[in-house]
Amino acid sequence: MPPSIITIAQQKGGAGKTTLVASLAAAWAATRRVTIIDIDPQHSLTRWHGLRAARKSAPAITLAEIAGWRLAGELDKLRRNSDIILIDSPPQIDTDARQAVRAADLVLVPIQPSPPDLWAAEGTFGLAQAEKRRLAIVLNRAPATGKLRGMVEADIARLGHRLLPTVLGNRTGFATAFALGLGVTETAPRSRAAEELRSLLADIEGALE
């Protein structure tokens, strides 16, 4: 079975894009061969991987350090030894971002439940549509209460985009795990944050089918 390639993309800072990539990678690494590709200029995912690599007990995750323009050629090699490939794309719509979207089986867009986050993702929506890629939105860092979530969900429905049913709450467990080079399913496997993450994995696997 060929590997699934998921590009996580969002133009607005603070949406939790890189933390989400790390969380997903760590959760899948328990049962799958996972490769992560960091083409975000900040390279925070690469630093996370460095912390993880120092922890010998954590399931291994492969980091592919390649430039975005080389992505298409390198993916053929990475597919041979991967079940899941996660791409942390750059925040701006440029050649690297286009390559990352074009390579994806699924473009996953994390959005905080606020109109500015949804507006900021319009470029990513357009890029995925132009490249004829499947797209799914996940509400991330969502507060426990508030009317904005309902408003944003209604706006997403009007736009005709797929919204995954699982919502990730604004929980410190995600950031704490990231700072340790781990995922929340590893640092606090019985927590509400871990439950949400595992539920999101099932949503994503359903979207890939």
Image: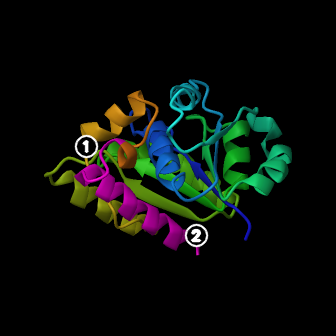
Sequence-earlier tag: 1 or 2: 1
For mark 1, what is the residue?
Answer: 170
Q: Compared to 102, does 174 lie above or below?
A: above
Residue at position x 46%, y 52% in the image:
27
Residue at position x 24%, y 51% in the image:
191
Disc assigned to residue 111: none
Q: CA distance from mark 1 to mark 2?
A: 26 Å
Left or right of 149? Residue 26 is: right
The percent coordinates of residue 114 (x first, y second) are 29, 46
For mark 2, what is the residue?
Answer: 208
Per the image, label 1 sits on a secondary structure element best described as loop
Q: Compared to 20, does 84 lie above or below?
A: below
Q: Is residue 58 visible?
A: yes
Left or right of 29? Residue 82 is: right
**Residue 32 or 141: which is nearer the viewer?**
32
Left or right of 194? Residue 122 is: right
Which range is magenta? 187-209
Q: Is residue 161 visible?
A: no
Residue at position x 57%, y 26% in the image:
50
